C-alpha cells in the first residue's frame, strides 16, 4: 500500500512539475483570433460628431517559435486583418463603404511567468512590416508590446488571452521618387485589442 501511495504521489508531482516551466528547446505553435463589430445606426452615422463610422474587423494570426531559454521564446508571427467600414458623406448626402486588408509579418519575443503550475502571464514584444493590399505606395512598420495570460489544459496545450498593449507605428507614403510623406502613431489598446487563441508546446 505504501508503494502504491508513493508511486501515486510521484506521478502527481511529476504531472504538476510539467506545467510549471517551459523548457529550453520546446517548440511553440499557435495563433490568435479576433472579431469586432461596432454597429452604428444610420442616424448616428449622419452625425457630424461621428468620425469612426460603422466598423467590422476580423483578425487571425498564426505564429511559430522556439524556447531559447526556460520560459523565453522567440519566433515569427503572421497577422491577417480584414476591415470593413461604412460612413456618411455629409457633403454628397450619401453612405459609402470601404474595405482594408493588411498582412503583418515579423519576429516576436515572449517571456512567461508562472503564477501557479497551470496558469502563466506573459509579455510579448513584436516588430512587423505591414503590407496594405489597398495601397502599394505605403510602407508601414509597427512595434508592439502586449501582456497576456495562458491557461494550460495539458502540459502541451494552452488557451490564451492577449490584450492589445501599446504600439508605435511609422508609415511612409511614397507615390514616386520625388514625393514622400511620413506619419507616426502611438496607440494603446487593452480590452478593445483583446484576442483569444491557443498554443501547442511540443517536446515539452
Image (cartoon, rainbow, N blue to C red):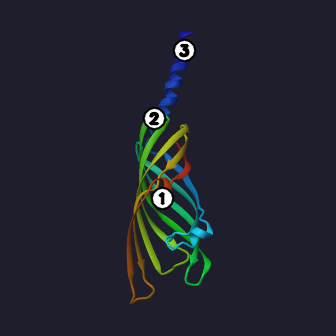
From the image, tell me which residue sits under label 1.
76
Q: Nearer the viewer, residue 44 or 63?
A: 44
Residue 102's x, y, as percent?
54, 69
Helix, strand or loop for disc 1: strand
SS for callout 2: loop
Instruction: State the residue lying farthest toward the top.
Output: 1
| Count of marks overlaid on the render | 3
Instruction: In the rendered view, tell whether residue 114 sits above or below residue 160.
Output: above
SS of the residue under disc 3: helix
The residue shown at (51%, 48%) is 161
Q: CA distance from mark 2 to mark 3?
A: 23 Å
Asked if the residue at tag 3 contacts the one at tag 2, i.e. Cβ–Cβ closer than 8 Å, the answer is no
Marked residue nearer the N-terminal end (1 or 2) = 2
The circle on residue 35 is none
Residue found at the far bottom of this picture? 178
| Residue 68 visible in the current orientation | yes
- Place of residue 191 in the rendered image (x, y in percent of width and height, measured from the top left): 49, 53
**What's the residue at 50%, 59% (across, down)?**
77
Q: What whole-number distance in Å separates the C-alpha atoms at marks 1 and 2? A: 24 Å
Residue beneath label 3, please? Answer: 5
Q: Quadrant of residue 70?
A: top left
**Residue that numbered label 2 is attached to:** 20
Q: Residues within 10 Å of mark 3 (few under 14, many from 20)?
A: few
- The answer to whether one can see residue 22 in this image is no
How packed mark 1 is, by other alpha carbons closer than 10 Å (few <14, some 14-19, many 20 or more), is: some
Question: How far separated are the C-alphas under marks 1 and 3?
Answer: 45 Å
Amino acid at each position: 500500500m505504501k508503494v502504491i501511495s508513493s508511486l501515486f504521489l510521484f506521478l502527481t508531482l511529476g504531472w504538476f512539475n510539467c506545467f510549471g516551466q517551459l523548457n529550453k528547446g520546446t517548440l511553440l505553435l499557435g495563433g490568435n483570433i479576433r472579431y469586432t463589430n461596432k454597429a452604428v445606426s444610420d442616424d448616428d452615422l449622419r452625425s457630424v460628431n461621428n468620425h469612426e463610422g460603422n466598423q467590422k474587423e476580423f483578425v487571425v494570426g498564426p505564429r511559430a517559435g522556439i524556447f531559447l531559454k526556460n520560459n523565453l521564446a522567440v519566433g515569427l508571427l503572421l497577422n491577417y486583418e480584414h476591415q470593413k467600414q461604412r460612413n456618411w458623406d455629409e457633403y454628397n448626402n450619401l453612405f459609402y463603404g470601404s474595405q482594408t486588408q493588411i498582412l503583418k509579418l515579423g519576429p516576436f519575443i515572449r517571456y512567461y511567468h508562472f503564477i501557479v503550475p497551470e496558469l502563466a502571464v506573459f509579455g510579448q514584444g513584436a516588430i512587423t512590416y505591414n503590407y496594405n493590399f489597398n495601397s502599394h505606395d505605403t510602407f508601414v512598420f509597427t512595434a508592439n508590446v502586449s501582456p497576456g495570460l495562458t491557461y494550460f489544459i495539458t502540459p502541451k496545450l494552452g488557451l490564451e488571452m492577449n490584450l492589445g498593449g501599446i504600439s508605435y507605428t511609422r508609415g511612409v507614403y511614397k507615390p514616386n521618387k520625388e514625393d514622400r510623406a511620413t506619419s507616426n502613431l502611438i496607440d494603446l489598446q487593452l480590452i478593445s485589442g483583446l484576442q483569444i487563441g491557443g498554443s501547442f508546446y511540443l517536446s515539452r
